[in-house]
Amino acid sequence: MADNVFKSHDIGLRAQKKILSRMATKNIAKTFIDGTTASLLDNLYRLCKMHTGNKAKAEKLIKNIIKIVIKIGVLHRNNQFSDEELQKAELFKRKFQNTQLSIISFYEVDFTFDLPYLQKSIAESQVALKSIVQPHLTEKSLGRIDEVFDFFGEEALLETAFRPDSPYREVMGKIVADINAAMETGDI
C-alpha cells in the first residue's frame, strides 16, 4: 500500500513539473513571481536579445530560466530535497550571491571587471545548482541549466556588457538595480 502512495506522489510531482514547465512564459511567470523578479527577467530578455540579435533565442533562454525556477520550486515545496541537498542549496545560494555581488561591483566601478573571476563564479554556481537538482530533473532540464549558465558565462557577452562604453550599459544598469532590489528583499 505504501508503495502505491509513493508512486502516486511521484507521478503527481512529475505531472506538476511537466504542467508548470509547459506554462512557462513571461506572462504566466509574472503571476507566480514578484515585480522585481519579473523586471529582472524582462531586462535579462532585453540583454539576451541585444546580444544575440535573435528574439527567439532570447525568449528561449528566459523560458528556460522560468522552467528551471518553477521545477526547483515544485521540488522544494514538495520536500523532495534531502538534508544533504539542502546543505548544497545553501552553498549554491552563497556562490550565486557572490556572483550577483560581483556583477554589481563590476558594473558600478569602471575598470574593475575581471573576466576569469566572473566566469569561474558563474561556472561554480552552475556546478553547485546541478549537484542539487541532478537526481530530480531530466537530462533535458539539466541541459536547460547548462544553456542558461553557458550563455551568461560567454566571454563575448561579459566583455561587452562590462565595458564602460558598452552598448548594453542602459540595460545592465536596470539589471543591476533589479539584482540590488531582489537581494534587499531576499527574492534572489
Image: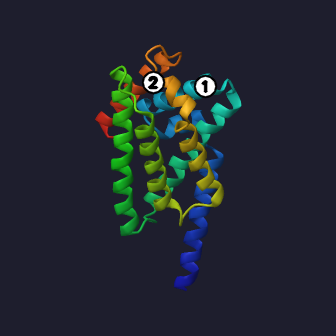
Q: Amino acid at mark 2?
A: Phe
- Identify the mark nearer the N-term, 2 or 1: 1
At x 55%, y 70%, the residue is 9
Image position, residue 80 (x, y; %): 46, 66
- In the image, farthest residue toward the bottom: 1
Estimate the x, y position of residue 125 in percent, counting from the top left. Answer: 44, 49
Identify the residue under disc 1. 51
Residue at 52% over, 84% down: 2
Front residue of 50 and 112 = 112
- How many numbered callouts? 2
Q: Secondary structure at mark 1?
A: helix
Residue for badge 2:
162
- Amino acid on which the number 1 mark rests in the picture: His
The quadrant of the picture occupied by the N terminus is: bottom right
Instruction: Name the mark on residue 6.
Output: none
Q: CA distance from mark 2 to mark 1?
A: 13 Å
